[in-house]
Image: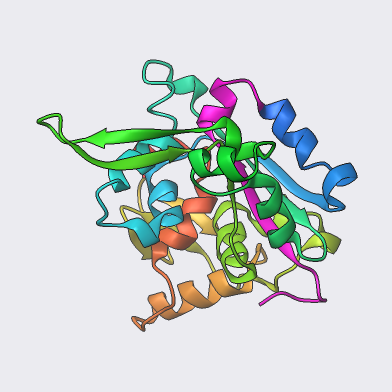
Amino acid sequence: MQSQGVEQTLVLIKPDALKSSVTGYVLSQLSGFHTGLRLAGAKIVHVSRMLAEEHYAEHRGKVFYESLLDYIMGRIHYPEEPWMRRVIAFVYQGPDAAKIIRGFCGPTNPHVAREKIPGCIRALGTVVPIKDVEGNVVGERMDNLIHASATVEEAEREIKLWFRPNDIPPFMRAYPTDESDEHYYFKGGRLYTTHEPKSVCLFAPGDTAWKSDLEILRLLHRGLPALASINTVAAKYLINERMEDY
C-alpha cells in the first residue's frame, strides 16, 4: 500500500532497446519535460533467472514463458556476450504515474502500437514468432523495448521486486519500511536465521527493508503461509550477485 499519496511506477528498458541503441530516445520521451514525473530510482541490472521468473510469474506455464525469460535476461539479443546482458530499471513518481508512462509506451503489441500510436515508444519494437522443436509456430513474443507497470497495485509489487528501500532516496519511498530484528540468510531456495556455508545474508539486525518483505520472512521462518515465496524476497537482494553461488 502506498503512503503519503505518492504514486510510483516501474519502468524497464529491455535488452532489445539497448541492442538497438534507442535508450536515449526512450529516456527523452520519459523525461520530466514530457511526462511531468520525477525520477525516484535507477539501476543497471543483470537479470537472473530467479528475478525473471518472479517478474513474469503470471505467465508461468504459457507457451511463450521460456522465451520471455530468455528475452528479459538478455540471452536472445546477446547470446554470445553475457557481459552485455542487462536491463535498466527506473522508478518514476508523480500523480497518475502508471497511466502517464503507459500512455507514452503505447500498446503492448508493437504492430498495434505502430497502427494506433505511431510515435509511441513501442512502435519501434517487433513481434517474434515462437516455434517448437519441429519448427511449427506455437506463439509469439513481443520485443517491445520497454516494460511499464499496468496498475498502481502492479507497480508496488514490481518496484519492491526490483528495488530495495536504500535504492530510493528516503523522502521518495512510497511504501512502508521496517528494520530487521534478526539475521536472515538464503541458500538454495531456503531461508535460514543462522549462517550456513555459501549462504548469503539478506538482512542483518538494523537493516532497512520493505515492511512487506520482513513480514514474509517472519511468517516463513515460523512455518506459516505467506503472501509470497522466499524467492520473491531474495531475488532483488541478489541482484548483480553471481547466482551460481546461491
> For the N terminus, which image quadrant?
bottom right
- Residue drawn at 71 percent across, 43 percent down: 42
Q: Is residue 119 left or right of residue 28?
A: left
Vertical side of 135 occupied by 189: above or below: below
Residue 139 at x, y percent in the picture: 27, 43
> For the C terminus, which image quadrant?
top left
Residue 61 at x, y percent in the picture: 24, 57
Magenta highlight on residue 14: yes
From where the camera sits, is residue 44 visible? no
Q: How many marks?
A: 0
Q: Nearer the viewer, residue 218 or 142?
A: 142
Q: Which residues are magenta?
A: 1-22
Vertical side of 171 occupied by 40: above or below: above
Magenta highlight on residue 10: yes
> Which colour assignment does the render follow?
rainbow
Q: Is residue 62 left or right of residue 52?
A: left
Residue 226 at x, y percent in the picture: 41, 79
Residue 105 at x, y percent in the picture: 65, 45
- Residue drawn at 60 percent across, 45 percent down: 116
Q: Quadrant of residue 159?
A: bottom right
- Residue drawn at 77 percent across, 65 percent down: 96
